[in-house]
Amino acid sequence: MSKIVTIERFILDYQPDYARGEFTNLLYDIALAAKVIAHKTNRAGLVDILGRAGATNIQGEQQQKLDVFADDIIFRVCDHTGRLCAMASEEREDIIPIPEPFKKGSYVLVYDPLDGSSNIDVNVSIGTIFGIYRCLNWDLRGRREDVLQPGRRLVAAGYVLYGSSTMLVYTTGQGVHGFTLDPELGEFLLSHENMRLPEPPTFYSVNHAYFDRWSPAIQRYLRWLQGREGREGPALSSRYIGSLVADFHRNLLRGGIFCYPAEKDKPNGKIRLLYEAGPLAFLAEQAGGYASSGYEPILDIDPTDLHQRTPLFVGNRSLVYQVERFLQEERVVSN
Ligand code: AHM
Ligand code: MG
């Protein structure tokens, strides 16, 4: 019979050597926030019946939009625990300081509270993405510098997928592990231990509507993925949800690549480095894959702006290397 392991038990048993209770409890806080958000998203279809987001409820209070709600929940679960020195959210312009009178801790949390906003109102999977850094300087902790760190310094990263079931997937640098929420028990139970990107890959995910906005190298790469460019192309099938977490998760289970390339008028694409690309890049590497901007590893990019964007190619290593090759060739030719 397979063993039943809660996320709490697993986090405790596999905590990294440097982790004292602070880090372990921080992961557990995120699991708690995920449960609250999952509960709310599961009821999202009832807003038309029970009150629309942005409308006023029976008590005369404004109904919150789901992404604002998720942002607020993560903040309220994490602000007073003494484990964090700062937070940064895709929903907020500046870093989020730890409010007085709470104590500051030694970790930094970056998060995209509810990614895939265009899918929220149409009952399609959405997700939360998070990354954890250590603060740089204990005496001065809580500054922008603590947040603006390259992905290579992440000590943990993960996502929560609100789909046909709710899953929390995370890494602390010791592999990628997935937990499924049992809604009746209210517990995340270990369901996917040591996830690895399978070979050969099956899917590629990209928004084809933007084909004309891509450089010739990216257009060529897409044809290569489809098996129409040279004999070695993998001839993958295509799937695109438009929710990064859901697209990434499917590709993690089936093998594949997610692409959000640069466009003629958007040289950095759309995906945010700190809240989206960085954490997923850490997970991908831990699952045997790789993430690149097309020119360098996502994890090596030094962020200079909290809301900086980057082109993103993430998935099986061989597929990501190939896009780097095509872009490199294009660069050589144009120089
Ligand atoms: P969001 O942060 O506003 O939700 O946007 C991010 C989302 C990703 O989840 C998804 O991969 C991408 O935007 C889809 O963008 P597009 O509709 O341009 O394909
Ligand atoms: Mg987002």
Image (cartoon, grey):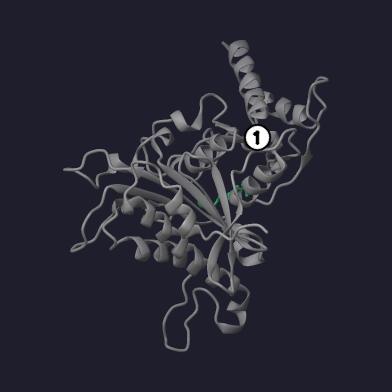
Q: Which residue is outermost to the bottom?
A: 58
Which residue is pictured at 21% across the width and 58% down the height? 103
Which residue is pictured at 60% across the width and 13% down the height? 334
Q: How many marks?
A: 1
Q: Nearer the viewer, residue 263 or 273?
A: 273
Q: Nearer the viewer, residue 64 or 175?
A: 175
Q: Nearer the viewer, residue 211 or 159?
A: 159
Q: Amino acid at mark 1?
A: Arg
Q: Position of residue 44 (x, y in %)?
A: 59, 72
Determine whether the residue tagged by mark 1 lies in a helix, strand or loop: helix
Q: Position of residue 81 (x, y in %)?
A: 29, 61
Q: Position of residue 77 (x, y in %)?
A: 37, 64
Name the quadrant of the N terminus: bottom right
Q: Nearer the viewer, residue 331 or 10?
A: 10
Name the quadrant of the C terminus: top right
Does residue 251 appear to the left or right of 23 in the view shown?
Answer: right
**Is residue 322 visible to the viewer in this orientation of the structure?**
yes
Determine if the C-beta at disc 1 is less than 8 A from ligand 1.
Answer: no
Does residue 114 appear to the left or right of 100 in the view shown?
Answer: right
Quadrant of the image occupied by residue 97: bottom left
Classify 250 as above or below 299.
below
Does residue 211 appear to the left or right of 56 in the view shown?
Answer: right
Which residue is pictured at 66% across the width and 66% down the height? 123
Residue under circle 1? 213
* Within-10-Å neighbours for mark 1: few <14, some 14–19, many 20+: some
**Is residue 272 visible to the viewer in this orientation of the structure?**
no
